[in-house]
Image (cartoon, rainbow, N blue to C red):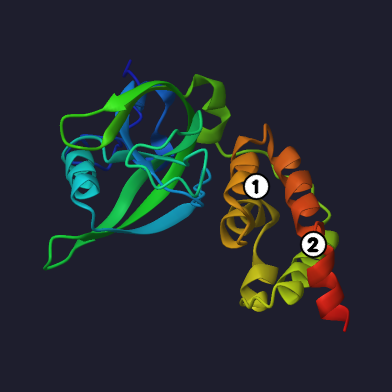
Amino acid sequence: MSSPLPSHLHMDDDIPRRIPRPQDMTLADIPPRLGLFPLPGALLLPWGKLPLNVFEPRYIALVEDALATHRLIGVIQPRDEYDEADEPDLHNIGSLGRITSFTERADGSYAITLSGLTRFRVLREQLGPRGYREASIDASGFSADLTESEPTSIDRSRLLDSLKRYFDAHKLHTSWSVIEEMEDDTLMIVLPMLVPFSADEKQSLLEADTLCARAELLLSLLNDTPDDISDAEDE
C-alpha cells in the first residue's frame, strides 16, 4: 500500500518542490511571522493579483528576503491613508501575497506580481533588522480563503448597471467587453480591486466575512455616489 504524497509533491515531478504551488497551500504552509508591505489604498484579495513596483531600499530588502525563503509578503493598509510617518499605525487585517512573477531592473528595483492567498490578522508587529516591519500573524480565521468557494449568487445585471453608472459619474473608463465576459466569482475579486474606492472602503471590502457580504457591500458602494457628482452628470 502506498502512502499519499504531500500536497507539494506530484507524481509527474522528478524533483520535489521546496514550497508548494499557490493552489496547493494550506494553513500549515503559512509562516507564523512575515514581512509587511504597508500600502495605502492597495487591495489584494484572495485569488487576486497585484502588480507592484518596488524601489524603496527597505522594501527591496523585503522582496529579496521573501524570494530567498517562502516568497510571501503581507500587504496591509495604514489606518490613515494620509499618514506620512515612516511607521504609521496599521489595520489589524491584511492580505498574504505570494510573489508569482518578478523582474529585477538594472537600477536594483523590482517589478513584482503578488497573487493573493488568504487574509490574516496581525498579532504583534515590530521593526525588523532589515528595515521593514515584521508581524506575527494568524490566518486560521480565514482558512476558507485558501479553497475555491462555491459559486456566488449575485444580481449580475444590477451590479453591472451600478458599475456603469459609477464609472460614468466619475468619468472613468474600462474595457466593458472584458468585464462582461468575467465569471461572477472573478468579478467579486477584480471589481473591488479595480474601482477607485477610498482606503477605508477597500478595507471594508477586504474584511467582509463572505463573498455574498462583499457583493452586497460592493453594490452599496457603487450606488453611493455623492450628490454633487450625480448632479453634475445630469446637467
Question: Which comes before the other along the chain, label 2 or label 1?
Answer: 1
Q: Which class describes the residues within 10 Å of circle 2: few (<14), some (14-19), or many (20+)?
A: some
232 sits to left or right of 56: right
Q: Quadrant of the N terminus?
A: top left
Residue at the extreme bottom of the image, as rendered: 235
134 sits to left or right of 158: left
Residue bearing mark 1 = 201
124 sits to left or right of 55: right
Q: Residue at x 87, y 84 (%)?
A: 235
Asked which quadrant contains residue 85, the reply is top left
Q: CA distance from mark 2 to mark 1?
A: 13 Å
Front residue of this view, candidates 6 and 158: 158
Q: Residue at x 16, y 30 (%)?
A: 129
Residue 5 visible in rendering = no
Q: Position of residue 98 (x, y in %)?
A: 35, 43
Front residue of this view, candidates 205 and 147: 205
49 sits to left or right of 52: right
Asked which quadrant contains residue 163, the reply is bottom right
Q: Amino acid at mark 1?
A: Glu
Mark 2 secondary-structure assignment: loop
Residue 203 visible in rendering = yes
Is residue 157 positioned above or below 35 on the image?
below
Q: Amino acid at mark 2?
A: Thr
For the residues labelled 2 and 1, say whether their Cβ atoms are less than 8 Å apart. Answer: no
Q: Position of residue 148 (x, y in %)?
A: 57, 39
Count of labels in the image: 2
Q: Position of residue 106 (x, y in %)?
A: 11, 68
Q: Residue at x 25, y 35 (%)?
A: 70
Asked which quadrant contains residue 152, the reply is top right
Residue bearing mark 2 = 225
Mark 1 secondary-structure assignment: helix
Q: Position of residue 47 (x, y in %)?
A: 51, 47
